């Protein structure tokens, strides 16, 4: 069984045993994440140029999560939340290239591996450096040795990963002129190229071959043998697939760009790399069919945050306010799909507010894993949402990023600025059911609700600081 899932949860106490549903086997789980793909960057939401037939098919066969949120408006924190079920401010990942995933955090890979799952990570890691000796990417080598935290130390028995971003075509190369570019055409003559500086690592060894062409294909080339091995061993698996597309620099081959010949070069490469990524989602599903695993696999797809750039950039929020780095909806509401044939109604849609932190408690329940609850989680079990019998989130979703904080309930959202003394000001309140574009601030006409939500947000922020202080006290 394969599951694609994105979730968030909040727990307290000692230990809880979470069992799979009555009479059900444990599903395989596939967690797919794109990088900087906006809420509107899918054709099932009516994009006027881009076509994503495989994501559309996934949504048609499963459930569209129309209010799915990344835990942060930038990549590293969101990735940490998906693996731990906890907001990354609890363990010091405040932004991209900041901190690392501490060894004390318990990841979903560690939980399910204890239950006999084969676990693999493929693609962008961005939760710590991958080499203590080789200078690479943003923090690799001796300068980032204290942040060394590869997937293999966090529960993944197989990993083919990069520390950070790469070009989305020929990921090891960039133009020799050294300019910081958003896009370029594939470099056919490598004499005109320079090494990009971000490496792929396979189980701790630097990869030096098989890295030509579309980056999403390169990643999937490693995923498929992994799931085939699990099938031969009759072992359930967790595959975490974190594509680089469509993070800058976007580079795509003519097979993909020629579909957008009438557009600007930047748009051609942006939409081209998304088309290529979508193609690999379809390739994965065909592979699952081939090994007779489709009905026993849960697939969860989402993006790590909203689109890069301003409103003139190719990525779109589908009309939502804000973009990457913002806590308005366009920065954190992302495409979300969960598909599990025979268990989640095909063609269903949910407006339930869910987040990447929900993945850990949701998957733990399905895998029959023992969930540690001595430390607070920020995610909840979404299985009730998938079955259609959970319609109200009991606790709002908290967000914090550089100088911004937000508190999102089933209907209302509070946004505020974090002051130098850790207070909140410039409070804004929105009714997301009536005003998803956050055009009308109703804080002045709803002072009681704004005050209550502000107190709740501050209490949650204090809980995150307490968690972080426990880490720091050990150092």
Image (spheres, rainbow, N blue to C red):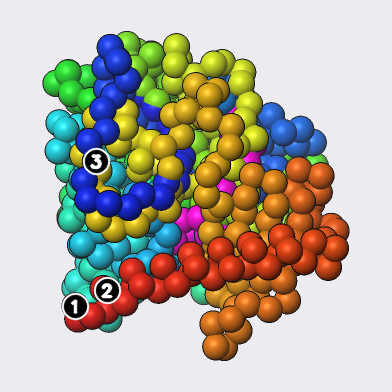
CB within 8 Å, label 2 to label 1 = yes
In the rendered structure, find residue 474 and report the number of the disc placed on it. Answer: 1
The residue carrying mark 2 is: 470
Front tag of 3 and 2: 3
Between discs 1 and 3, the one toward the N terminus? 3
Spatial separation of the CA atoms under disc 1 and disc 3 = 26 Å
Residue placed at 36% from the left, 22% from the top? 297
Between discs 3 and 2, the one toward the N terminus? 3
In the rendered structure, find residue 257 and report the number of the disc placed on it. Answer: none
Quadrant in which the C terminus is drawn: bottom left
> From which residue to which does the magenta span run?
64-78
For mark 2, give the secondary structure: helix
Relative to 157, is 331 above or below? below
Residue placed at 29% from the left, 63% from the top? 101
The residue carrying mark 3 is: 16
For mark 1, give the secondary structure: loop
The front one of 88 and 216 is 88
Quadrant in which the N terminus is drawn: top left
Residue 375 left/right relative to 353: left
Q: Residues within 10 Å of mark 3 (few under 14, many from 20)?
A: some
Q: Residues within 10 Å of mark 2 (few under 14, many from 20)?
A: few
Residue 451 left/right relative to 189: right
Residue placed at 70% from the left, 42% from the top? 40
Q: Position of residue 340 (x, y in %)?
A: 44, 20
Observer able to see residue 419: yes
Q: Position of residue 304 (x, y in %)?
A: 51, 51
The front one of 97 and 228 is 97
Q: Position of residue 352 (x, y in %)?
A: 60, 37
Observer able to see residue 259: no
The front one of 312 and 207 is 312
Among all residues in the image, which is located at the extreme front? Answer: 448
């Amino acid at each position: 069984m394969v599951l694609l899932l994105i979730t968030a949860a909040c727990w307290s106490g000692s230990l809880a045993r979470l069992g799979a549903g009555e009479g059900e086997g444990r599903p395989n789980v596939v967690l797919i994440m794109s990088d900087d793909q906006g809420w509107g960057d899918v054709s099932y939401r009516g994009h006027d140029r881009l076509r994503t037939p495989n994501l559309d098919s996934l949504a048609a066969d499963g459930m569209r999560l129309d209010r799915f949120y990344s835990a942060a408006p930038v990549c590293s924190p969101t990735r940490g939340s998906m693996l731990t079920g906890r907001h990354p401010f609890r363990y010091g990942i405040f932004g991209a290239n900041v901190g690392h995933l501490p060894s004390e955090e318990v990841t979903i890979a560690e939980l399910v591996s204890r239950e006999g799952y084969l676990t693999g990570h493929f693609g962008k890691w961005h939760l710590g450096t991958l080499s203590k000796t080789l200078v690479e990417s943003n923090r690799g080598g001796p300068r980032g040795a204290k942040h060394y935290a590869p997937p293999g130390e966090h529960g993944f028995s197989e990993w083919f990963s990069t520390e950070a971003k790469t070009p989305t075509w020929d990921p090891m190369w960039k133009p020799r002129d050294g300019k910081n570019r958003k896009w370029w055409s594939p470099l056919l003559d490598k004499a005109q190229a320079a090494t990009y500086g971000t490496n792929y690592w396979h189980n701790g060894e630097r990869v030096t071959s098989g890295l030509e062409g579309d980056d999403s294909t390169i990643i999937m080339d490693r995923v498929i043998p992994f799931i085939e091995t699990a099938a031969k061993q009759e072992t359930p698996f967790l595959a975490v697939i974190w594509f680089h597309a469509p993070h800058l620099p976007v580079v795509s081959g003519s097979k993909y760009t020629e579909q957008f010949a009438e557009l600007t070069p930047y748009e051609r490469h942006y939409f081209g790399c998304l088309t290529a990524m979508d193609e690999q989602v379809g390739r994965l599903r065909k592979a699952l069919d081939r090994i007779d695993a489709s009905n026993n696999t849960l697939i969860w797809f989402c993006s790590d945050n909203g689109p890069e750039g301003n409103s003139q950039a190719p990525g779109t929020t589908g009309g939502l306010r804000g973009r990457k780095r913002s806590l308005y909806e366009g920065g954190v509401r992302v495409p979300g799909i969960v598909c599990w044939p025979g268990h989640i109604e095909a063609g269903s849609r949910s407006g339930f507010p869910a987040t990447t932190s929900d993945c850990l408690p949701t998957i733990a329940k399905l895998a029959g894993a023992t969930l540690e609850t001595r430390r607070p989680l920020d995610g909840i079990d979404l299985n009730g949402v998938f079955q259609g019998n959970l319609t109200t989130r009991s606790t709002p979703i908290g967000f914090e990023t550089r100088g911004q904080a937000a508190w999102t309930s089933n209907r209302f959202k509070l946004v505020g600025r974090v002051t130098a003394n850790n207070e909140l000001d410039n409070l804004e309140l929105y009714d997301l059911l009536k005003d998803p574009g956050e055009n009308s601030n109703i804080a002045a006409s709803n002072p009681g609700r704004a005050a209550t939500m502000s107190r709740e947000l501050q209490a949650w922020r204090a809980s995150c600081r307490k968690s972080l202080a426990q880490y720091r006290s050990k150092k």
